[in-house]
Amino acid sequence: MKGKYIDEFYKNVEKYESDFHEYMNSKSKRGRKRKNKMYFTPVTEKAIIAYNKDKDQNKRNKVYSEYIHYPVWKLAQNIINRFKFPYMNGTTEDKQYEVIGFLLQKLGKFTESKGRAFSYFSIVAKNYCIQTNNKAYKLLKSKDNLLAVDRQRDIINEEIQSSRKESLKDFTDLFVESYDKQIENRFSKTVDIKIAYAVMELFRRRDNIEKYNKKALYVLIREMTDEKTQDISRVVNTIKRDFKEKFEQYEQIAQK
């Protein structure tokens, strides 16, 4: 029946928003309240899912206008303002609308299996901008004086590295949340399970321990688990392989 998915969304939207606000207002482990500055929320994600599943064009237009347009517009604006992408054609506003147009083409490809909508569309938008920017750079390089163009080369490399770091951060949050639930299936030994949980805890605290070297991290895990270094190495290597494999899949999905 046409419209049933969007009707279901509107039937539950107050609960979705209430659950989201309750989560945002809950206290963190440090006792500070989370600040709700999100424009692209789980409610947006549910609206996109309903929009993609439904066939009633009038209702699709309504849910898009009320719950999807602004988050997509804001996401495009933030990415352009943050990374600039100096070789893309047009003004900042022109670039923004170009990104919005591209995201709308990709909107129908999003499903629950692709992770969080915000992470997915952020990666899609940044990859599009990087590729477009690089194509424009190569064209400029072929036409202009090489010395003049070279002055801007580091800017592009910085943008690409920054974008990859952002993608990696988004993925790591998803990886920890998912992997934590699979540890007891992934590892059979009690020792390995205990070490794996400790590694996930360090992932969660990574912002505070970013400057630690590899040896210091092993010391932290040993202190948390009281297990031998060789056991820690075995579990860490398994998690590293799993992380690399899943991240490669994550990037491939985002580029489709």
Image: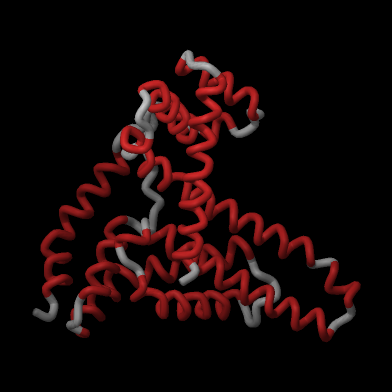
Residue under the point 62% across and 63% down: 83
In the rendered image, the vertical position of residue 113 relative to residue 65, given as above or below: above
Point out residue 230 in the picture as x, y percentages from the top left corner.
Answer: 55, 22
Residue 218 sits in quarter: top right
In the rendered picture of this protein, how many numbered marks are placed on residues?
Answer: 0
In the rendered image, the vertical position of residue 171 relative to residue 89, given as above or below: above
Horizontal arrangement in the rendering, residue 40 relative to residue 15 (left or right): right
Residue under the point 39% across and 23% down: 194
Quarter placement of the N terminus: bottom left
Q: How is the image coloured?
A: secondary structure
Residue extending furthest toward the front? 188
Point out residue 130 in the picture as x, y percentages from the top left corner.
Answer: 62, 69
Residue 144 sits in quarter: bottom right
Pick the residue in front: 103 or 73: 103
Pick the residue in front: 71 or 150: 150
Residue under the point 78% across and 81% down: 140
Point out residue 201 in the picture as x, y percentages from the top left corner.
Answer: 44, 30
Residue under the point 25% across and 73% down: 51
In the rendered image, the vertical position of residue 209 relative to residue 69, given as above or below: above
In the rendered image, the vertical position of residue 224 relative to residue 253, given as above or below: above
